[in-house]
Structures are given as C-alpha cells and as structure tokens.
Image (tube, rainbow, N blue to C red):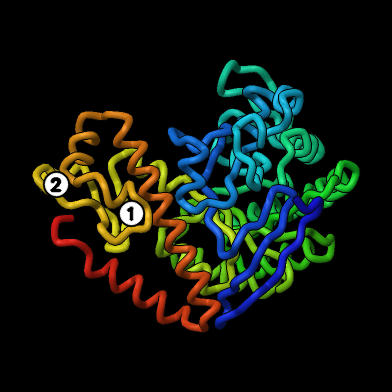
C-alpha cells in the first residue's frame, strides 16, 4: 500500500471531473459517494456487504467515536480500520456538524467546543488540536479540520463570525496535523453560509493555508436546493483544480448529479441507509416507497437490471411485508439496495465524464426518474 496521499485528475467534461485519490489504504475513484459509518459501522450492514455495493471509502465520526468507545481505546485495539474490519480508506468528520446538531448540549468559545455528552452528561472538550489528535488515533486516511457549522437561514454577521472562527480553527488544525502527519491527508472546510462572497473569502484563505483537499460544509442545513447549488457553483472555481473537492452531507441522487456537474468529487450522506431503514428504495426509475399497500401483491423485483443481486432477487411484495412487519431484514436489504444504486450512479457518472458525455448521462438519468414506475 502507498504511504502517502495524492489526487490525480484524469478527465473533465465541462465542470465535471473524473479523478483518482490514492491513500494508505487504497484508491478511491471519483466522483465518489461515501457511505456513512458514524459509530464505526454503516448501520445494520456487514463490511463485506458495503464493499459489495461498490463503496471504496466510508466515513466515521470524531465526536461519536470520541465518546464511545474512545479514540485511545480504538488506537490500542489497532485503529479504526482493524476495529471495524474495513481495510479500505476511511474519512473522519471532525465533529463540526455536531457543533450545530447538538447546539443545546454545547458551549462554543475561541478555544473550541465543550459538549455535554448525550450519553451520560459528562462534559467533554473538543478543540481543533484534540479533533486532529483523535483522528490520528483512529488512523483516518482523510482527516477534517474542526469547524463551526451554522443552520440556515442565519444573519450575515453571524455567518461571517462563524466563517472567521472556522478559518482560525483551520490554521490551528493544520499546525496540529503537521505534528502528527504520517502519510495521511487533511482537508479544510469552506464555510460562509448562503453568502457567495463569504464563501469565496473562506475558500481563498484556506487555499493560502494549503490543504490536501477542500470540503464545502454548512449546506443542506435548511436552505433550498437551488441555493445550495448556487453556492457550490460559485465556490468550486475558487478551489484548486489539482485537489479533491468534497461536498459534505449531500444528498439525494439529483443533488449528486447536479453537484458533480458543478465540479464536486466526493460526497457523503445518511440518506440511502436512513431512508432504507424506513422502507424507501432508490432505483434507476426513482424512489419507491415499499410501505405503500400497492406493493403487497407485486411479484417483481425492485430492479431486474440492477448490478446488485439484492435488487434483482427479492420481490416488492416481500420487501413490503418486511417493511410493514418492521423486520430488520427489510431495513438491511433496502440499505444495501440503496447504497448499490448510489454507487452505480457514481460509476455511471465517472464513465460518462471520461467519455465526454456527462450532460447526456445526466439528462437520461433524470428522464428515467421522471418516467418512474407505474406501481410506485
């Protein structure tokens, strides 16, 4: 395995990019979708099942693993890859999203964030330096700076304050990372809410600091899709073309297509697995709600042409039954089906970009979704 991180841009088609990331635990073809394994597991799925969908990298979370079972414990047990039996690359989110999502349980200062643990009420401090230390203990292939993520809409002065704080934390994160670096990568996170000028200011300042890759954070947090896509389109050109670009926490299949068209390389989102656990399947012909009674007698599989056997094997009637009976197998199967569809969509985008046919691929995918399925 290589002992360093690199990114190679292999093809472009308009703003869409086809590339390859090399990490100490293997290669990642981009555009890439990362299944979310917040607590050291993609919920309900065996690692081999996740790999079989085509996933080449997963995401873990600094905040949650810090609280349980603890970063030092995971390090003593051989690191996160060994701990969760995932030999491929891992990206770890620094905990910045929890600064927003757990706002009632935290106190923010220049130094960092003090959380009241949602598990036992204990007070825990997370600073930029500690976030980097935790990610190093976990053995992440890609670490993220600690940042402050705001829910939108928000006042411009509040957005500017959070962006500037995130930049100061970016500088501290980078200095901390340089003291523990061992062939891994650190990404900076662009903040600035829905203000294009603040986004570009953040991006340029991060580029001046110099990171291995750049993420666009603080989107899909309350704003409409058109606002999110506008910010992506205005921010991506301010980021270096020779480094990967990661849009955090996005999204729907349509979000992925639209963001790739605007120059994004990496994504993560809980949507395919969370929706799968609630009876929703993502397919080439759009989303299918298996809880709907119209599927009760439907002998057809979800997608007879899918590359993954789970989508071809089980009838819609059976998946409907599992969903209505709240059987865990239904959640497992639909999570697998959804991740497999997301990976198939990403593979299709990569091939289309390489062939110079991305716009055609995008239009064809949307047309299939629009036609839908008569039994949806």
Q: Quadrant of residue 134?
A: top right
The answer to whether residue 131 is left or right of residue 85 is right
> Which residue appears at 41% of the width and 61% of the height?
253
Above or below, 350 relative to 73: below
> Which residue appears at 69% of the width and 55% of the height?
189
> In what element is the residue under mark 1?
strand
Residue 98 visible here: yes
Where in the figure is residue 158, as x and y percent of width and height? 64, 52
The disc placed on residue 295 is: 2
Q: Which residue is mark 1?
A: 282
Q: Nearer the viewer, residue 31 or 83?
A: 83
> Which residue appears at 27% of the width and 29% of the height?
327
Residue 111 visible here: no
Q: Residue furthest right?
A: 179
Q: Quadrant of residue 111?
A: top right
Q: Nearer the viewer, residue 237 or 159?
A: 237
Where in the figure is residue 65, as x and y percent of width and height? 64, 30
């Amino acid at each position: 395995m290589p002992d360093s991180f690199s990114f190679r841009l292999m093809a472009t088609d308009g703003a869409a990019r086809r590339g390859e990331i090399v990490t100490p635990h293997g290669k990642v073809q981009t555009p890439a979708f990362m299944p979310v394994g917040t607590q050291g597991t993609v919920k309900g799925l065996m690692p081999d099942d996740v790999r079989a969908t085509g996933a080449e990298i997963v995401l873990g979370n600094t905040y949650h693993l810090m609280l349980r079972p603890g970063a030092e414990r995971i390090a003593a047990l051989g690191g996160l890859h060994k701990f969760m039996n995932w030999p491929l690359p891992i990206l770890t989110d620094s905990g910045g999203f929890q600064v927003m999502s757990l706002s009632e349980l935290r106190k923010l200062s220049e130094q960092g964030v003090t959380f009241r643990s949602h598990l036992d009420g204990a007070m825990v401090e997370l600073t930029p330096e500690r976030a980097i230390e935790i990610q190093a203990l976990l053995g992440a292939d890609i670490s993220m700076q600690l940042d402050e993520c705001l829910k939108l809409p928000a006042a411009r002065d509040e957005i500017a304050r959070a962006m500037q704080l995130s930049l100061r934390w970016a500088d501290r994160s980078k200095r901390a990372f340089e003291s523990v670096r061992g062939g891994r990568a650190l990404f900076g996170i662009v903040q600035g809410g829905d203000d294009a000028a603040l986004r570009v200011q953040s991006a340029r300042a991060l580029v001046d600091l110099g990171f291995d890759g750049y993420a666009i954070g603080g989107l899909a947090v309350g704003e409409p899709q058109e606002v999110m896509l506008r910010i992506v389109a205005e921010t991506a050109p301010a980021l270096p073309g020779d480094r990967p670009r990661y849009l955090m926490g996005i999204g729907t299949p349509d979000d992925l297509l639209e963001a790739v068209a605007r120059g994004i390389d990496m994504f993560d989102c809980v949507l395919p697995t969370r929706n799968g656990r609630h009876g929703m399947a993502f397919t080439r012909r759009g989303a299918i709600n298996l809880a709907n009674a119209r599927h009760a007698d439907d002998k057809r599989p979800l997608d007879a042409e899918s590359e993954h056997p789970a989508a071809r094997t089980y009838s819609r009637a059976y998946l409907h039954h599992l969903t209505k009976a709240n059987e865990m197998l239904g959640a497992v199967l639909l999570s697998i089906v959804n991740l497999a569809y997301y990976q198939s969509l990403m593979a299709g985008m990569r091939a289309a970009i390489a062939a110079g046919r991305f716009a055609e691929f995008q239009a064809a995918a949307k047309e299939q979704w629009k036609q839908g399925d008569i039994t949806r």
